[in-house]
Image (spheres, rainbow, N blue to C red):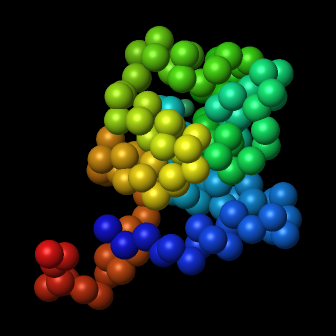
Amino acid sequence: MHINDAVFLEDLCPKFRLRQWRKSIHRFTGKSCIYCGKASESIDHVIPRSQGGLSTTENCVPACLSCNGDKSDESALYWYRRQKFYDPRRAMAIRAWLDGDLRLAIRLLQWANPNSLIKKNNEKGSSGYRAA
Ligand SMILES: [Zn+2]
């Protein structure tokens, strides 16, 4: 697994404009919904704004419109537990994300869905290479 650390520092920097910030959120998961793994079309507040959730990277996750709409004003972890597509690894990823540990979150998401769109850097051109 090769995740470019520099991306995280830059994307967390507050001077970045909102649009770039939103893009970067989607990029973290390879544009897949953190809850169900489908294409993410929106940004969801894990802790809803109505409950004091902030628009920070830690509280904002990529989500498909279906999950985002269905979840509505509920706290994500409670809502997610009741879903048919519930996966404990994704739940752990959401917690890690909330804690600001995006790298751990992404690792857990890759574990939950190894065939997802999440991009692995350095994949091409290193056919014989294996990480120890
Ligand atoms: Zn979804």
Find residue 46 and report its image quarter. top right
Query: Dividing the image into 4 quarters, which one contains the N terminus?
Result: bottom left
**Residue at the (59%, 67%) spot, across then down:** 8
Residue 127 vertical placement versus 69 (above, below): below
Could you tell whether 78 is left or right of 73 in the image?
left
- Quick one: quadrant of the C terminus? bottom left
Using the image as rendered, state which of residue 46 and residue 121 is in the foreground: 46
Q: Is residue 25 above or below residue 96?
A: below
> Looking at the image, is 40 positioned above or below residue 52?
below
Farthest residue, direction top = 82
Residue at 85% over, 65% down? 17
Judged from the image, the quadrant occupied by ligand 1 is top right
Q: Is residue 70 left or right of residue 52?
A: left
Tally of numbered tags: 0
Q: Is residue 108 visible?
A: yes
Q: Residue 32 placed where, x, y %?
A: 52, 46
Side of 131 where 45 appears, left or right: right
* Residue 92 image point, x, y percent: 41, 35
**Residue sitting at 81 percent across and 64 percent down?**
14
Q: Is residue 103 above or below residue 128?
A: above
The location of residue 15, given as percent across then percent down, is: 84, 69
Q: Position of residue 99 (x, y in %)?
A: 55, 44
Q: Which residue does the image show at 47% across and 12% down from the upper left?
A: 82
Task: Judge by depth and name the residue closer to the eye, 99 or 39.
Answer: 99
Visible in this render: residue 20?
no
